[in-house]
Image: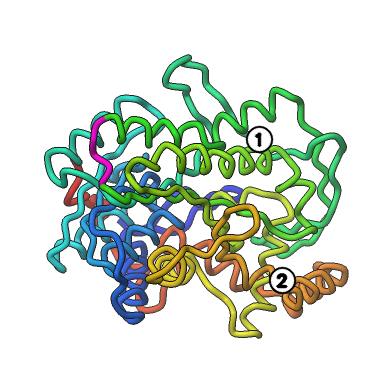
Amino acid sequence: MIIVPKVRGFICLTSHPEGCAQNVVNQINYVKSKGAIDGPKKVLVIGASTGFGLASRITSAFGAGAATIGVYFEKPSAEGKPGSPGWYNTAAFETEAGKAGLYAKSINGDAFSNEIKQKTIDLIKSDLGEVDLIIYSLASPRRTHPVTGVVHNSVLKPIGQKFSNKTVDFHTGVVSEVAIEPCTEADIENTIAVMGGEDWEMWIDALKAAGVLAEGATTVAYSYIGPLLTEPVYRKGTIGMAKNHLEQTAFTIDEKLKDLKGHAYVSVNKALVTQASSAIPVIPLYISLLYKVMKAKGLHEGCIEQMQRLFATRLYNGGAVPLDDKGRIRVDDWEMQEDVQAEVAALWEQATTENLSAIGDLAGYRNDFFNLFGFEFPGIDYEKDVNEVVNVPGLV
């Protein structure tokens, strides 16, 4: 079938298998160009199909030569119905891993469930024996609690008072004011239940109890802080409370891994165009301005550049892992440089519908958004028929 983008708000309802494959190959080529990393050898990535999770899997495999197991929840392709981008990404990754002689298998299902945790443990036991790196990179709007059965839904809201500021419709380029009502206590609790550290800890507890964590095993989850501009709706809002919980959980897990000489870390990453960030008011405008400034300074990174730098210069640098005063790894350091933030803040004050295309990088934002779904890659003929039915080679 001929597959074209069908956009509804901040979501693209279609994805292109050849474009997604090109996206994966581009990331693999980048990692290979940076040279080998003396890193992990048996890796589990929870949330492995898009964004930072996919980039972590690619870096583990093609940077460190690791065997990888990926867990994700994606829509398979079917005749007349394209799969989700994460489905096509995983198919492409596992195909390329096979060509390179690298072990790569995956499990498609609800990572919050006990069933998927057990299925993953069984696969590790049968194929790898143990894992030495566990990446936790889930991005989900809801979670069914495996013990209580309660369905929790996360929300993006400020705490205490209404938030008003600029935002942009990145499809039309229209800059407008957005107002978000404050949350309830229940909103905070539900968002922490979905996006906090409880499930991460449940995964590590289950893996440890099953005896599949290697001596010295490391686990890493991902977080974001961001600038003062977004603080009321992000870091000091409901999502920020969940991120605080996640970051505190790292210390709890780290204590539990001491007998294995293992460690748990949270890596604070850069603001990037992802399916999740596109849904957050204010963030698309901030990223458009940030991209303009960071590209001009030669500091811009995408997911794969961030993860390659995380592995090569932080986690597996041959020495101690550098941490900030709150015990976190920081690869948002270039984004948060004083000169970068000062320029972004100045541009923010100026930004209007009329001048954004000149003072910001809205075109770069849009391109990255469509790339997430396999569109707008040079060299791919989007007007030709493509086979929408693609199998994931290592699907268990």
The quarter holding residue 24 reads bottom left
Residue 153 is situated, as x and y percent measured from the top left of the image, at 58, 29
Q: How many C-alpha atoms fall within 10 Å of the one at disc 2: few (<14), some, or many (≥20)?
A: many
Residue 132, magenta (yes or no): no
> Label 1 is placed on what type of residue?
Val
> Which element carries disc 1, helix, strand or loop?
loop
Residue 213, magenta (yes or no): yes
Q: Residue at x 56, y 36 (%)?
A: 196
Q: Is residue 179 above or below residue 37?
A: above
- State the residue position of label 2: 289
For the record, the magenta segment spans 210-214
Residue 104 is situated, as x and y percent measured from the top left of the image, at 20, 54
Q: How many C-alpha atoms fall within 10 Å of the one at disc 1: few (<14), some, or many (≥20)?
A: some
Q: Which quadrant is the C terminus positioned in?
A: top left
> Label 2 is placed on what type of residue?
Leu
120 relative to 222 in the view: left or right: left
Query: For this rendering, which residue is in front, 327 or 396?
Result: 327
What secondary structure predominates along the stretch shown in magenta? loop
> Which element carries disc 2, helix, strand or loop?
helix
Query: For this rendering, which residue is in front, 352 or 253?
Result: 253
The residue positioned farthest toward the top in the image shown: 148
Q: Is residue 205 above or below residue 96?
A: above
What label does residue 307 carry, if any?
none
Q: Which quadrant is the N terminus positioned in?
A: bottom left
394 relative to 284 in the view: left or right: left
- State the residue position of label 1: 155
How far is mark 1 from mark 2, CA to CA? 25 Å
Sequence-first tag of 1 and 2: 1
Residue 89 is situated, as x and y percent measured from the top left of the image, at 33, 57
Please count the marks in the image.
2
Q: Residue at x 33, y 49 (%)?
A: 217
